[in-house]
Image: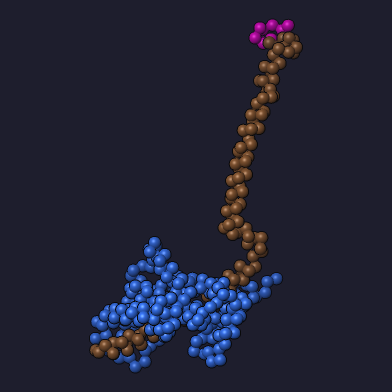
Chain colours: A brown, B blue
Amino acid sequence: VTTGHEDDRLARLLRATRADADPFLWTRVRARIEGRERVPRPLEWLVRPAALGVSAAVLVVALGVSWALLPMRATGESEDPTTVVEALLADANGPVDAAGLAWPDSGSWQ
Amino acid sequence: VPGPATSAATVRPCPRAREADLAGFDEAGLIERLRANDLEALGELYGWLGEAMLTLARSMLHDRDEASDIVEEALLRVRRAAPGFRGPRGLRTWTLRIVANLCRDALRRRRFSAGPPEDLDPHTAAGLATTPVEGWDAGMDQAVLIAALERAIAALPAEQREAVVLRDRMGLSYADVAEALGISESAVKSRLFRARETLKQKLRPLME
């Protein structure tokens, strides 16, 4: 078999094989394009990765600010004697204490 | 109420304008309509070049589904890039260049994945169709030869495979192959020479 014959056979075999066009492929592409173009602009903006990144950043900042504000508020509250124990302790020297309410321990009612 | 034009389930046959039936085909007009984002024009482009796009993708990847995904993506890119179209050698070469680039990306990704099973017949897996070769020697089994040829093409390095598919299978000129692959004509010839030698060597035992 000469090289010329080999080349000819190879060329003919190569040209004998092709792919058939797939009409469903165009249907899918068309549906994808039309689907994308139907998405409302605000929704399209929301699904963009950049928008998601910005949203995540805003969330992180908001959480950070909240976290920073909470201890400040707690510190401010601790200065007021508003808990039950603190109120009782604060009132221990007051006129109510003078009425004498420690009766169950003494076993007598005065 | 959405009409049939917007229904994804509607089977809409693509315009049949195959390369062989292109007498009087207005490529410049099609380019203008693509630039204007005309969806029907994209359908006509697929009708014209769909076979070529699928032949290239299936011959490169030997995976029917992956090749379909590549061609779908290529059409979306054609639509996106059409307003800035500057194809010195026309729409066909430009479109096939997009397909070739996507195939290269897919082959690169395969390095990190298992890829198709090794024992799969590349001709069957690719979903390629074969027409009988006229005047073929009856003593040689064409089906066996074509299966062996497809296996040999699948084993070629990707840069040789794309050259042999575009030039020898699809019949593009050397200049068009060079444009589609973004290389010089001499590089195309060099790749083709090496590819053909490898293919002949692998088929020689079956053709003697």
Residue A65 figure quarter: top right
Is B91 on the left or on the right of A69, as rendered? left
Q: Is residue B200 above or below residue A95?
A: below
Residue B66 visible, this orientation? yes
Q: Confirm whether the magenta stretch covers residue A107.
A: yes
Picture coordinates of residue A43, whole percent (x, y): 64, 60
Q: Confirm whether the magenta stretch covers residue A37.
A: no
Tell me the residue at 64%/75% (across/down). Answer: B5
Quarter that holds the C terminus of chain B? bottom left
Q: Is residue A105 above or below residue B61?
A: above
Decide which of B16, B167 is in the foreground and name it: B167
Is A2 on the left or on the right of A100, as rendered? left
Picture coordinates of residue B91, whole percent (x, y): 52, 81
Residue A28 figure quarter: bottom right
**Magenta region:** A103-110
Tell me the residue at 25%/89% (across/down). Answer: A2
Decide which of B132, B83 is in the foreground and name it: B83
